[in-house]
Image (cartoon, rainbow, N blue to C red):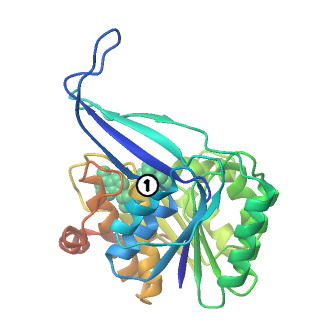
Amino acid sequence: MIYTVTLNTAIDRVIYIDGILSRKKNNKVKRTFYDIGGKATHVSVVLSRLRIPNIATGFVGEKNKEKLMQLLEEKGVACDFIAQAGCPTRETLVILDDAGEGSFMITEKGFSVHGDTLEKLRRKLSEKVTEGDFAVFAGSLPPGLDGDQYRELLQAAAEKGGKLILDTTGAQLRSAIRLKPYAIKPNEDEFQELVGKRLNTPDEYASEIKKLLQAGIEYVIVTLGKKGSLVGHGDEVYRVLPPKVKEVNDTGCGDVFVGGFVAGLHQRFPLEKMIRFATALSASKAEQPESSAFSPERAEQLEGEVVIRRLPA
Ligand code: ATP
Ligand code: MG
Ligand code: MG
């Protein structure tokens, strides 16, 4: 089984404004709808769309959890969240207007996770995730959870042989490295922060990636937005160039990349096929306005355009 774990879940409230969003004016709404907020939840959406069984877990606020569950279930995702009573799941306002310059995002912090809520998730992960399973942790920490507690959750998911796939950042990522996760997927900024220096060339990236491979991480993937990615596995690092597409919105490309990668692991794709698939799928996301939209059909057309080169040792 594949478990996706989102600790700071969100519901996106997307609002399209008629005209340009302006102060001191009645901004009229053209269209509004709810969408699933990232991060690991989006990985579940990708997997379910590809008909790969998975369970989405993490924390939700009891008050409006039905809305999020409904959005996920509409996309075929099985949910098994821990709900905290008396709290709302946070809402993120995503405001788009006719300026064509991207969206405004207004995010809430989320509710503070109590000790007993944390313990319920820890126990669930420890009981359910076993040998041969993957546990995908993606996104930020909610208020009330510190790095040590985060590591306890990771340990619970790994203690019976579950493989950890991490898409996270900052201090959390740094402290999780000690547990030798199976795979990590920082983006360019997150990786430079992790290694504590600016990296300018693919070879500079490759040498830092190799250190992490040698420390026992099976896959070290650094995504570079429209510049593609670097994929480290075994003793090798590959430079991956994505297909050229018209970028409409790159928010969520990383989540779709992780979804494609995990789908590839589940199907035991050879490395090259896995890279092509995840890269083409995330490129298809860049062409779409919504942060969780992508197209497997389009990805199939794009796969052949992905260029993979082994970097010199
Ligand atoms: P997020 O956290 O918003 O989901 P991210 O910053 O973690 O995203 P990126 O590095 O921006 O992830 O993108 C992930 C992958 O998506 C890239 O490695 C690339 O393969 C693909 N991608 C992103 N933008 C484009 C683009 N404009 N054209 C083609 N592929 C893209
Ligand atoms: Mg990015
Ligand atoms: Mg990301």
- How far across and down, in percent of the image, does residue 75 sit? 34, 68
**Residue 209 seen:** yes
Q: Quadrant of ligand 1?
A: bottom left
**Residue at the image point whose x is 25% and y is 52% from the top:** 288
Q: How many badges with numbers are in the image?
A: 1
User: Is the CB of mark 1 within 8 Å of ligand 1?
Assistant: no
Q: Of 18 and 215, which appears nearest the observer?
A: 18
Figure quadrant of residue 210: bottom right
Q: Of 79 and 180, which appears nearest the observer?
A: 79
Q: Is residue 17 left or right of residue 147?
A: left
Q: Secondary structure at mark 1?
A: helix
Q: Is residue 193 left or right of residue 244?
A: right
Above or below, 280 against 157 in this view is above
**Residue at the image point whose x is 69% and y is 76% from the top:** 124
- How far across and down, in percent of the image, does residue 116 sit? 79, 61
Q: Residues within 10 Å of mark 1 (few under 14, many from 20)?
A: some
Above or below, 17 against 129 in this view is above
- How far across and down, in percent of the image, does residue 312 sit? 50, 71
Residue at mark 1 = 67
Above or below, 78 against 227 in this view is below
- How far across and down, in percent of the image, does residue 181 sit? 67, 73
Q: Is residue 305 left or right of residue 82?
A: left
**Residue at the image point whose x is 77% and y is 55% from the top:** 147
**Residue 201 seen:** no
Q: Amino acid at mark 1?
A: Lys
Q: Of 84 and 239, which appears nearest the observer?
A: 84
Q: Quadrant of the C terminus?
A: bottom right
Residue at the extreme top = 24
